[in-house]
């Protein structure tokens, strides 16, 4: 709930209230029970709320029923909220295409309900032709747009593939930063690459890969030039359609020589384990076989005793991976990190 609230704030919403219900099963009609929905309705009227965001994944029929009960307000689920912030943060033509494709695919099966919901997806649909229902027109338009975007993305990815081939032929080694969103990847990237990428924007500050060349003179450690890549952060229970939208980002990671998995050491134990498990799951499915160095970040805000606990909790999940503690903000242990990166890359040569 808190994570969804953070994403909502980052997307520009003011969070007026959070309502939780404990149930054995999700209500098939409204996601929450009818009594809880009435409570939400009362809160909407009392606080003059215009948007309700559900922390889970809603079906199209659930969205339609909820709107019918709550009135003419915007209803989003977690995935649509994430897509919304992706749209606001996308800065390249590639990421914009990826996000548009993910949104079309995610809402494709909503055809009949989408026509009735007037704006739950940002598609404007005219009247159907003779013998056609409006949802059939919507689906035909959606298929055409999906095909067009897929073609455009293939062209972009061909260029990306050629760039990766060029890097490989030139002997450049690739080190990629990844990890759960808001773990401090961009702050570490800025320190290592002497960059000034914007930070502190909340979840998903980085939506596309951002690469910089680091040579031996700049850090005094690397034998050969290294390409450092900042990438999109992971998040728990990301819908597979949204994950596939960042195909190129995952390809960049899969083709790297070393992955620095950044972990927020300042999280409480429950949050830490949830985020580490999510990161491990994504990496096992998408990045199997790529060497990993786990970096416990933000050690400047935890005690030594707590840090020992975080190291042990991390090692329980990443049993075979090397673990290093650092602070991207203060620079603590950064020289040791550079030394370990050089050793790992040299050992692979």
Image (tube, grey):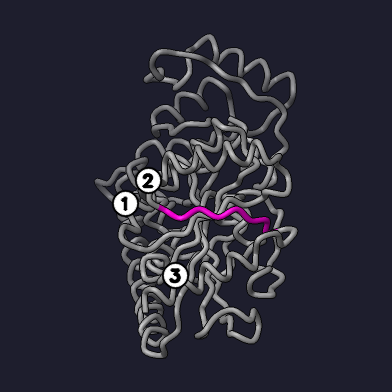
Q: Residue at x 57, y 22 (%)?
A: 70
- Inter-mark Cα distance, 2 to 1: 6 Å
Check whether the beta carbons of the residues at disc 2 and disc 3 lie within 8 A of each other: no
Compare residues 259 and 319 and report the one nearer the observer. 319
Res. 192 image quadrant: bottom right
| Farthest bottom residue in view | 170
Image marks 2 and 1: residues in contact by CB distance under 8 Å: yes
Task: Kindly identify the residue that appears in the image at 30 percent across and 55 percent down.
Answer: 140
Q: CA distance from mark 1 to mark 3?
A: 23 Å
Q: Which residue is mark 2?
A: 281
With 300 as the anchor, is 21 left or right in this view?
left
**Which quarter shows the N terminus?**
top right
Image x and y of residue 103, in percent: 44, 51
Helix, strand, or loop for circle 3? helix
Residue bearing mark 3: 344
- As drawn, 272 above or below 282: above
Q: Is residue 120 left or right of residue 9?
A: left
N-terminal of the pair, mark 1 or mark 3, is 1
Residue 325 in magenta?
yes
For mark 1, what is the residue?
285
- State the separation of the CA atoms marked 2 and 3: 23 Å
Q: Which residues are magenta?
A: 321-328
How far across and down, in percent of the image, does residue 284 sit?
33, 51
- Which badge, 2 or 3, is on the more N-terminal residue? 2
> Residue 226, image x and y in percent?
51, 80
Q: Does residue 315 sit above or below 322 in this rendering?
A: above
Return the residue nearer the eye: 7 or 51.
7
């Amino acid at each position: 709930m808190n994570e969804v609230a953070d994403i909502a704030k980052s997307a520009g919403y003011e969070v007026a209230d959070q309502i939780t219900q404990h149930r054995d099963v999700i209500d098939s009609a409204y996601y929450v029970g009818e009594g809880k929905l009435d409570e939400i309705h009362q809160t909407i009227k009392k606080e003059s709320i215009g948007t309700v965001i559900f922390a889970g994944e809603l079906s199209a029929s659930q969205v339609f029923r909820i709107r019918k009960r709550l009135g003419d307000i915007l209803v989003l689920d977690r995935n649509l909220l994430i897509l919304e912030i992706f749209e606001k943060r996308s800065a390249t033509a590639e990421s914009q295409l990826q996000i548009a494709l993910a949104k079309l695919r995610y809402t494709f099966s909503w055809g009949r309900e989408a026509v009735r919901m007037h704006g739950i997806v940002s598609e404007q649909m005219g009247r159907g032709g003779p013998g056609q229902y409006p949802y059939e027109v919507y689906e035909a338009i959606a298929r055409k747009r999906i095909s067009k975007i897929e073609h455009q993305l293939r062209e972009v990815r061909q260029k990306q593939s050629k760039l990766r081939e060029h890097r490989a032929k030139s002997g450049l080694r690739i080190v990629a930063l990844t990890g759960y969103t808001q773990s401090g990847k961009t702050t570490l990237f800025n320190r290592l690459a002497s960059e000034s990428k914007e930070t502190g924007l909340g979840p998903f500050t980085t939506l596309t890969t951002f690469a910089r060349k680091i040579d031996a003179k700049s850090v005094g450690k690397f034998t050969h030039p290294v390409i450092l890549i900042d990438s999109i952060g992971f998040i728990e229970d990301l819908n597979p359609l949204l994950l596939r939208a960042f195909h190129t980002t995952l390809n960049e990671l899969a083709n790297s020589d070393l992955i620095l998995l950044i972990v927020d050491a300042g999280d409480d134990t429950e949050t830490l384990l949830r985020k580490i498990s999510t990161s491990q799951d994504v990496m096992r499915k998408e990045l199997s076989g790529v060497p990993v160095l786990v970096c416990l970040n933000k050690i400047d805000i935890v005690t030594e005793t707590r840090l020992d606990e975080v190291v042990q909790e991390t090692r329980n999940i990443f049993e075979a991976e090397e673990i290093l503690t650092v602070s991207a903000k203060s620079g603590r242990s950064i020289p040791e990190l550079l030394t370990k990166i050089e050793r790992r890359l040299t050992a692979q040569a």
